[in-house]
Image (cartoon, rainbow, N blue to C red):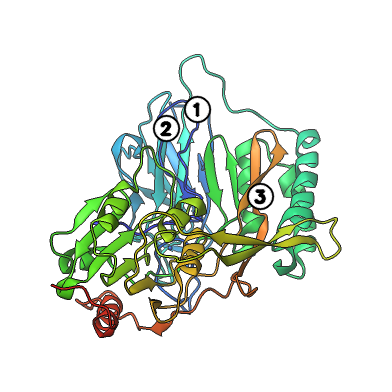
Amino acid sequence: MRRAQSSTANPARGTGLGAVGAATVVLGWLGGLEAFGLSVPGRAMAEPPRVVEVVPDIGDVGVDPTLTELRVRFDQEMSPGGRSICGGGPSALPVSGKLRWIDARTVVVPVSLRPSTLYSFSINCPSAGNFRGANGESVVPYAVAFRTRGEGEPGAATLTPGETKPMVAALRMALLERYSHFDKLPADFEQRLERAAPELEAATTPAMFARRVRDVLRATRDGHVWVRVNGVTLGVRDEYATPNADARRLAGILKNAGEFEGVTTAKLADGIAYIAFDDWARRNGDWLAPAFEFLDGLDPAAPLVVDVRLNGGGDEALARTIAARFVGERFVYAKSLIRNPEAENGYDGPFDRVVEPAGRRHVGPVAILIGPACVSSNESFILMMRKPGRRETFGDTTGGSSGNPKPHELGSGVTLFLPSWRDLTGEGREIEGVGIEADHAVAWPGTDATTDPVLEAAVAWLKDKSVVAPR
């Protein structure tokens, strides 16, 4: 069955760390959901603990394979009774003994490392949160990826203050001149950056510099901001909305479903069809082919459910190829304001984004299932699909996060990705931080329920439409 997505605008990418393997590591995911992944909604009264540092940490390369201990330091006193080190396969952390606490905030993990190997894991994860603070709160998940050096390979590259100072200047310029949501930064952000400059300049490796940039940019709480170093992506946001869908629950509801990479199809009762899209990611091969085949096999007037509640975005052009099967004429579904510090108001535009009909058109009523995990290009897809009376949305307001991130080279192999546009609806309403409201709001019961009320409401609406395909 389908999986919950971290985001696209979750910046999940294969981790490089040299030529050894590939893994998906996103710090700021553990990710896929308040923008791209899974978490408990709201915030507890007690502040959850956070990882301050892991040695070795995310992005490190040239790590000594004879290292026998990994250290994790937290920002508050911890309860020593539990642990969760998530991850499996060849890149799993090879824990070789019992963990021991050397003080109330620091735990030592015995390891047995191999040369020339990529390790990727996380301290806690959405499915396991046994590292807890003394206050009982589970540690915010923290992803780690590092690579040990092989025989004869050099250690990690080093930096000097002479190299890091221009990197800090490049960071400042990118944020103030190219970040499309620069006016939403905290009022004292420049002062925070000024205070952080000495620590940034004191970074001794590119990975350390990237981690410190990540920490500074947490203040943006923007799922479309991330840093890349040594092939690893470090996101700055680690609080995400809970999707209003459950893949396991859906698997029990959908009978004889066709499950493909990224796509699920099914036939429901009363001639109603169902199709879901995990994301709009670029993959090898034509992964959308099963979707087109399914749509082509339907009566064009058949009532249809399109479920994108677990879709965190991806490539908007791919989303348009699906939406083109439903629209009757060319129309403007969204507008973009492009950041340009030389423009009078700081932006060029707005520029129209359009969708045009293509292929065999589906004319029957369509219920689109949406929710808070819908962000980025998936929100664009939802805008393409809206048509009151014939194509209506069910569920909850979307996440309200877009940006079209662009790279900015900071130097020494560190790249900062920042949103380049402000996304607007076709009518000119901003989406960032607001989202798209559902035409039919349906409360989500949480993990204890055995039904899917969002799907049920959509099916009831489709049954009431005037055009209903025969059984």
Q: CA distance from mark 2 to mark 1?
A: 8 Å
Q: Is residue 283 left or right of residue 420?
A: left
Left or right: 4 as drawn, with respect to 156: left
The answer to which of marks 1 and 3 sits earlier in the sequence is 1
**Residue 7 visible (yes or no):** no
| Quadrant showing the N terminus | bottom left
Residue 71 x %, y %: 47, 45
Q: Is residue 411 above or below residue 275?
A: above
Q: Which residue is mark 2?
A: 118
Task: Report crowding for label 3: few under 14, some 14 to 19, many 20 or more residues within 10 A (C-alpha).
Answer: many
C-alpha gap between disc 2 and disc 3: 23 Å
Given the image, on which type of amino acid does mark 2 rest?
A: Leu
Can you identify the residue that label 1 sits on? 18
Q: Position of residue 290 (x, y in %)?
A: 28, 49
Q: Quadrant of the C terminus?
A: bottom left
Write down the residue under mark 3: 213
Residue at x 44% of width, y 55% of height: 358
- Name the N-terminal-most of marks 2 and 3: 2
Circle 2 — which element? strand
